[in-house]
Image: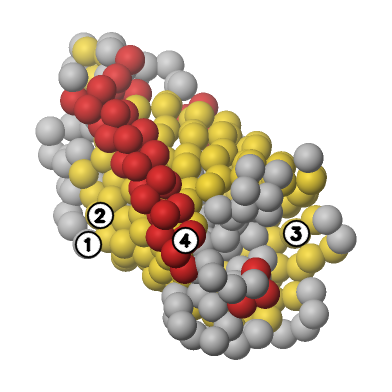
Amino acid sequence: MKFRLLLFGFLTVAGAGSLHAQDMLSALDTGNEKDFSIATFKGTRLINFHTTETTGPRTLDFRISHRFGAINSGFEEAFGIDQTANIRLGLEYSPDGRFMFGIGRSSFQKMVDGFLKFRLLRQTTNNSMPLSVTLFAGAYRAGIKSPVINGFELYEKETSRWSFNYQILIARKFSPSFSFQIAPWYNHYNMVTSISEQNDSYGASALFRLKFSKRSAITAEYAYRANTYSNTTYYDSFGVGYEIETGGHVFQVHLTNSFGLVENQFLPYTDTQWNDAGIRLGFNVSRVFTL
């Protein structure tokens, strides 16, 4: 029952928000498209975190994300390169440049994810609207074989495999070279592994992009976890990266302490830290197609 309510809320809020936001944007869009600030960020994600950006109208984005093992695994493991990697393949599409949806599949936990994004507000060049605001809702299903804990299968029920994430992405392009974003986030797991864990976690993230040439930029992101939801020690997700655009591709290479590639993994359950070189080399490749 709880799963149905959460799923219903996920779809209803996203749908209702979309309709309401379109009305708001219709009222705001009194000028030319050129009145809006463009390319606050180069892609729909910075390193791990979603940005306020959506793909263009009738545009399909094929994304490959890859994370190696931890650098502190040492020379024998080629500083993480020889260890088991986490790979995600994803497809994202927007029919109109404002509403976007996507699906993906990660090798870690055999996670299948789907999400909705909607650009509620867009920053204007004359600062009549000083911020861009995008709504995000994600749903995730763990496909791994059900672990047995104290003689019971953790995923005995299908609903136990599901988790959800909600965010409000708020960004501003301060100059042609510098953009900044903050985002409160909330994560819910239908099932946790022990009675010492809470189903809900929440916090806020921040990220920036500093462009230093026509096609290159330095990026960084950080997520703060506000509540104590587990007796196990976890760490805030933090990453730094380099981004380059080459034709229809955007290539991002980075260092991050998060192994997970979707929100329900890296926001609450990052289990390595920068202090002891528990960081991982990773990259994202994005290729867009106009349909």
Instruction: Tell which tag, 3 or 1, sits nearer the viewer.
Output: 3
**SS category of the residue bearing label 2:** strand
- Asked if the residues shown at circle 4 and circle 2 are in contact, with their CB atoms under 8 angstroms apart, the answer is no
> Label 4, label 1: how many angstroms apart (C-alpha)?
32 Å
- Measuring 61% from the left and 68% from the top, which residue is drawn there? 41
N-term-proximal mark, 4 vs 3: 4
> Label 2, label 3: how many angstroms apart (C-alpha)?
30 Å
**SS category of the residue bearing label 3:** strand
Res. 42 in view: yes
Three-letter code, disc 4? Leu
> Label 3, label 1: how many angstroms apart (C-alpha)?
33 Å
Q: Quadrant of the C terminus?
A: top right
Q: Which mark is residue 226?
A: 1
**SS category of the residue bearing label 4:** helix
Local packing at callout 2 (Cα closer than 10 Å; few below 14, some 14-19, many 20+) is: many
Q: Name the residue under label 3.
A: 250
Three-letter code, disc 2? Tyr
- Measuring 19% from the left and 25% from the top, which residue is drawn there? 2
Q: Which of 236 and 275 is in front in this view?
A: 236
Local packing at callout 1 (Cα closer than 10 Å; few below 14, some 14-19, many 20+) is: few
**SS category of the residue bearing label 1:** loop
Q: Mark 4 points at which residue?
A: 25
Q: Name the residue under label 2.
A: 202
- Asked if the residues shown at circle 4 and circle 3 are in contact, with their CB atoms under 8 angstroms apart, the answer is no
User: Does 81 sit above or below residue 4?
Assistant: below
- Measuring 77% from the left and 83% from the top, which residue is drawn there? 213
Q: Which mark is residue 22?
A: none
> Label 1, label 2: how many angstroms apart (C-alpha)?
6 Å
Q: Quadrant of the N terminus?
A: top left
N-term-proximal mark, 4 vs 2: 4
